[in-house]
Image: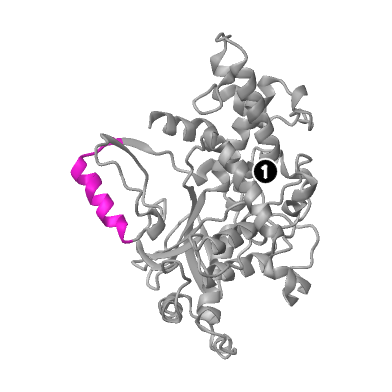
């Protein structure tokens, strides 16, 4: 646990800034841990019920309840809504290591390809039309389209809470029912209701009602707000705008809108999705190249008995963080060619560590806590506010689920990659 805290402090904090909270290690009792098991059991997907908290642990990591505003604010006694988004991988790989028979990876994102495998294996009953490339695009129209798709079919990528209690999300293997959608609209209508003119629009279902769409507009503002000055990473300067061919957005008239037709647009520097994407894009080899580095590392380690620099050969955290971070932030990182034999052990180790760091960002979650301004007192001075119509909302944004990824999973990632390509190419 101490190493998890150090990883957050030494590696993640410099890259993700104030979007993350450093966990605190605290002593716990078995009775307390059992109560946690009991409380979360009803909220977990059936496929994950076999995973429980170890009630024999003596310590745990403590974080503030980020489903509420942080810094904490309760001046107006209005409810706090929290949107949890697991955005997944926000870019298409361009690595030269990608084989010709796997070129589909450059056109269709990982999430959209994975959907077909999940349907085939019965994980979900219906394919989600959400595409991470739209959410990370920086185009407000595309991003709102992605948010609407998450509402329609959240799977495990979106949940909405009210005052810390689950308000809306997937139902088992299925998307929310019509009654769930109506209930969400009725709740949001109390604080995100639109003008009379807007209410006269054609009703296309509960999720298309103005109150729900106003709520998404506030969420979108929070996602686009720049909390940090700029990511310390220098990855984005040459990044082209990307589109996924499987996205429903590219198949609708929305792409012809003024906002959606701009060829060059990026997320604002320092916005929550921007800092996540910067870390994700540290993976410039894709699993094909990283697997070659992993094999080279394994072969070189097994071929030598030299133990003079074990730290330099270690793939998994902990390792010397200053040297690693300095190299990650360097703008002069050497290009790794497709010839694995020409790669040094030091370069192979660094690329694997960087891939695992990027993997943490690929699997993280964003928590947006949103509280409507009260009607009786406007003397607040909360640092993060946004406006929609004639209403004001306080919000906070954080990144969670930042567990380290072990190098032992690399062969599993490689096999899954092959499986995804095979399934998608067979459609």
Mark 1 neighbour density, 10 Å: few (under 14) some (14–19) many (20 or more): many
Place residue 358 in its image quadrant: top right
Range of magenta residues: 26-42
Q: Helix, strand or loop at disc 1?
A: loop
Tell me residue 143's x, y (percent). 64, 64
Residue lying farthest left? 31
Q: Is residue 178 visible?
A: yes
In the rendered view of the protein, which quadrant contains the N terminus?
top left
Q: Can residue 90 be seen in this view?
A: no
Report the residue at 27% width, 56% height from top: 39
Judge by depth and name the residue closer to the eye, 405 or 393.
405
Tell me residue 153's x, y (percent). 53, 69
Place residue 166 in its image quadrant: bottom left
Left or right for 240, reference 247: right
Left or right for 203, reference 34: right
Give yes or no for residue 35 being in the magenta stretch. yes
Give yes or no for residue 418 being in the magenta stretch. no
Residue beneath disc 1: 281
Q: Is the magenta stretch mostly helix, strand or loop?
A: helix
In the rendered view of the protein, which quadrant contains the C terminus?
bottom right
Report the residue at 49% width, 43% height from top: 402
Q: Is residue 229 above or below residue 372?
A: above
Place residue 23 in its image quadrant: top left
Tell me residue 174's x, y (percent). 46, 70
């Amino acid at each position: 646990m101490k190493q998890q805290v150090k990883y957050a402090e030494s590696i993640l904090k410099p890259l993700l800034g104030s979007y993350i909270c450093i966990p605190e290690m605290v002593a716990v009792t078995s009775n307390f841990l059992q109560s946690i098991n009991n409380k979360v059991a009803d909220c977990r997907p059936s496929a994950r019920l076999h995973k429980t908290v170890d009630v024999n642990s003596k310590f745990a990591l403590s974080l503030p309840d980020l489903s509420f505003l942080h810094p904490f604010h309760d001046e107006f006694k209005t409810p706090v809504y929290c949107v949890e988004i697991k955005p997944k991988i926000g870019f298409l790989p361009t690595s030269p290591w990608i084989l010709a028979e796997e070129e589909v990876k450059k056109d269709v994102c990982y999430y959209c390809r994975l959907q077909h495998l999940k349907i085939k294996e019965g994980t979900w009953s219906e394919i989600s039309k959400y595409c991470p490339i739209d959410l990370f695009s920086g185009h407000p129209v595309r991003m709102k389209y992605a948010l609407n798709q998450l509402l329609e079919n959240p799977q495990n990528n979106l949940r909405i809470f009210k005052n810390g209690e689950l308000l809306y999300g997937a139902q088992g293997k299925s998307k929310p029912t019509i009654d769930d959608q109506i209930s969400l609209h009725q709740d949001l209508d109390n604080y995100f209701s639109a003008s009379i003119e807007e209410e006269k629009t054609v009703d296309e279902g509960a999720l298309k009602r103005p109150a729900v769409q106003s709520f998404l507009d506030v969420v979108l503002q929070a996602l686009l707000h720049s909390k940090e000055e700029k990511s310390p990473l220098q990855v984005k300067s040459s990044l082209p705008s990307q589109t996924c061919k499987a996205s429903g957005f590219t198949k609708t008239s929305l792409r012809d809108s003024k906002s959606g037709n701009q060829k060059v647009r990026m997320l604002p520097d320092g916005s929550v999705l921007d800092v996540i994407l910067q870390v994700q894009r540290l993976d410039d080899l894709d699993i094909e190249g990283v697997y070659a580095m992993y094999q080279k590392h394994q072969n070189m380690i097994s071929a030598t008995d030299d133990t003079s620099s074990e730290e330099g050969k270690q793939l998994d955290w902990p390792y010397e963080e200053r040297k690693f971070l300095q190299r990650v932030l360097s703008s002069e990182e050497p290009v790794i060619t497709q010839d694995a034999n020409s790669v040094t052990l030091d370069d192979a180790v660094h690329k694997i560590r960087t891939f695992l760091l990027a993997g943490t960002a690929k699997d993280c979650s964003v928590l947006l806590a949103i509280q409507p301004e009260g009607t009786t007192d406007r003397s607040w001075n909360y640092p993060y506010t946004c406006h929609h119509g004639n209403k004001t909302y306080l919000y906070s944004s954080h990144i969670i689920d930042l567990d380290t990824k072990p190098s032992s999973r690399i062969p599993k990632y490689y096999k899954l990659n092959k499986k995804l390509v095979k399934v998608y190419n067979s459609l």
